[in-house]
Structures are given as C-alpha cells and as structure tokens.
Image (cartoon, helix red, strand yellow):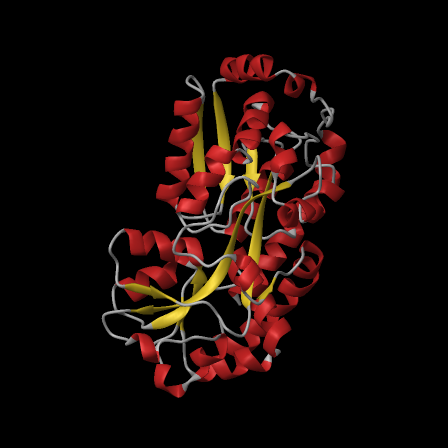
Amino acid sequence: MPGKMMRRHAAAGLAALGGAALLWPRPGRAADTAGSDAAALQQAARQEGSVTWYVAQGDTPTAERMGRTFTATYPGITVDVMRTTGQVAFQRLLLDIKNQTPHCDVFSATDAAHMPILKERNELTHYVPPNAADMVSRFKAQSDDGWYYVTDAGRWVPIYNRDKVKPADAPKAWTDLLDPKWQGRVSVGHPAFSGGMGAWMLGVVQLHGWQYFEQLARNNPRIGRSTQDTVTLLSAGECLVGPTWAPGAYRAVDKGEPIGIEQASDGGVVMVFPSAIPARAPHPNAARLFLNWMLSAAYSNLEAADGSEPIHAGVPPRADEPALAGLKVVAPTAAELRQGVPELIEKWRDTFGN
C-alpha cells in the first residue's frame, strides 16, 4: 500500500499544478543576465544571503558538509539543507508549488524522471551554468541543457558485513542475493520512498526480468526506506548482504564500519542524479551560483572522494574504485524511469506486500 499511496499523492500534486499556475504569476524562466558576469552573480547572491537546497542525494551529514563548503567558498551565503528521500523531496516541492509557497532554490533528485515532469509544467528556471562545459560527456548527455544537469552519479554495488561474511562467500553478482543461505539476512530499500531503489530495480529488471524480485521475495528481505538503511543494518550486523548506492558504502568504509564492497559481475547499475532551479526559487541568484558550483571541479572532487562518479571531466575517480569504463553497466534513462518505476512500485507492492 505505501507504494500505491505515494504515487497517488504525487499524481494528485501534479494534477493540482495546472490550477495553481493560473493563479500564480509565472516568472520569466530565462533571466540569466547575472550568470554572464561571475562577479555580478556573486554580489547578487550575497544580497540574497541564502539558498535552500532540497536534496535526496547522499545522507544528511554529507549534504550539510557540502553546504558548509559552499559557504566557505562564498562567504555570506548560507545553505539551508532539506534532506530526505527522493520521492518525499519531490512531493514536498509539488506541495510548495500547489500552495504557492516557494521555498526551494535548488532541487536535487534521485529520480531523474522528476525533472522532465517539472519542465513540462514550466516549473524549472532556464539557466546554463558556465561549468557545464566541463562535464563528462556521458553525464552531459543525460542532462537537459539549460534546464537540469547531472550533478551526482553513482553505481549500485553488492555489499556485505566483513565481520560475518568471508570475502569468498560474499555476493559477486545480483543473482547471488537470491541464494537461500541469505534467507532473512538481505537488506533492501523501498522504491516508493527511494528514487535510487527504483533506478536499481529497473536496471536489474533490464538484466534479469521481474522474476528476479519474485525470487528475492522468497528470501524474506528486510525492507527499509532509504538505500542508506542497508548500510546501517549491515554495519550493525542485523543483516549480512544487500544492494546499495556505492557512495554510501564507501563513506561507511572510511568511517571504519565492517562493510565489504563488490562490483556486480552481471551488470552494475549506474544512476544519475540531476539538479535544477525551480521556476519560483526565492533566491534565484544564489541558486544559480550554487548550481554552477555543483558542476565545478571542487565539488566533483568532494563527491568522487565519497565514491561518486566524477562529473567534471578533469577529476579522477576514487583510487580504490574501478573505473566505469572497465565494467559492464546499465544506466536507465529518465524516460525509462518515468515509465518503468511506477509500474515496478505496483509490482513491488503485490510481490512483497508493503
């Protein structure tokens, strides 16, 4: 039922946008004049003084650390971080739009399908960040120039508890999670709450079909909300194996948690996380400055250190993470996510019963 309710709520919010748009004067979406002059943009952003960031990418400590780094780079501009799961962040933005109470300056999604929906409803600001010219080509191709840009990307990996699972016994492929020896010891997220989980599911369905999840259900996995729940449960030894987004796993490793990481031999699932400026952003200049910073080499270095894929072409990947070029990967597109994830949520509810 949660999956169905989530999608119903989102659909209701989207339906309400049409009526709200008639009552709420729409700002000009192509007002990019400040972006042509970096000094003028910074001055205008400092006059606004803050930027509110709706973010589902990563965890709360990481998002807050990014916000503090931005403020250190641009003193006088604070970052108000509103971090939650991908579907919840989207619903919050829809509610802001419906109620004509704009709060969000930069929206960073884990479900790439959210961006075309917002664009079609004229709810995004048109802005071309200068740093977009230096993006890795594969991620620039998955952006919509002027409307939204991939600011973070990461692969999904099988992980395990190193204290309780020997490396030789650890899952090396997604199909290994189906082994009956993991009965009751697999942790997964919930696609109705986590946009990342929906992307992983779609990638696995492309590789193995829905029967994969019918078999996974027989192992009685423990179902959380966020993909980060899997890292938490494995670190505590409450579960032993599971799929998760690589950056969350690498951050746990860096903290000394007993997390082992493998690369899925049957196909790594790569998700891209786009960011955009809502059409009614209360602090539009600070938002432009923040979005351009998210495409900088400095930001990409911070993300890569946590295990994300470098977005800036001049930034190398983390030293202990294999390059994508040497791996078999699948990368669901925004169009595939938009069509496929709602269907998968309904199938999930029918198969897993929640």
Q: Is residue 258 above or below residue 176?
A: above
Residue at the image position 56 percent from the left and 76 percent from the top: 350
Q: Is residue 285 above or below residue 232?
A: above
Where residue 336 sits in the image (x, y, percent)? 69, 61
Q: Is residue 296 or residue 277 the one in the foreground?
A: 296
Q: Quadrant of residue 125?
A: top right
Residue at the image position 43 percent from the left and 31 percent from the top: 80
Furthest-bottom residue in view? 180
Q: Quadrant of residue 329?
A: bottom right
Q: Is residue 234 or residue 296 the one in the foreground?
A: 296
Where residue 347 sits in the image (x, y, percent)? 60, 74
335 sits left or right of 171 in the view: right
Where residue 181 sits in the image (x, y, percent)? 35, 86
Residue 61 visible in image: yes
Q: Is residue 32 above or below residue 105?
A: above
Q: For the image shown, how many numbered marks are present on the structure?
A: 0
Where residue 38 sits in the image (x, y, percent)? 59, 17
Q: Is residue 47 or residue 311 the one in the foreground?
A: 311
Q: Is residue 192 above or below residue 49?
A: below
Q: Quadrant of residue 232?
A: bottom left
131 sits left or right of 305 in the view: right
Residue 183 visible in image: no
Residue at the image position 62 percent from the left and 47 percent from the top: 139
Q: Is residue 215 or residue 34 the one in the foreground?
A: 34
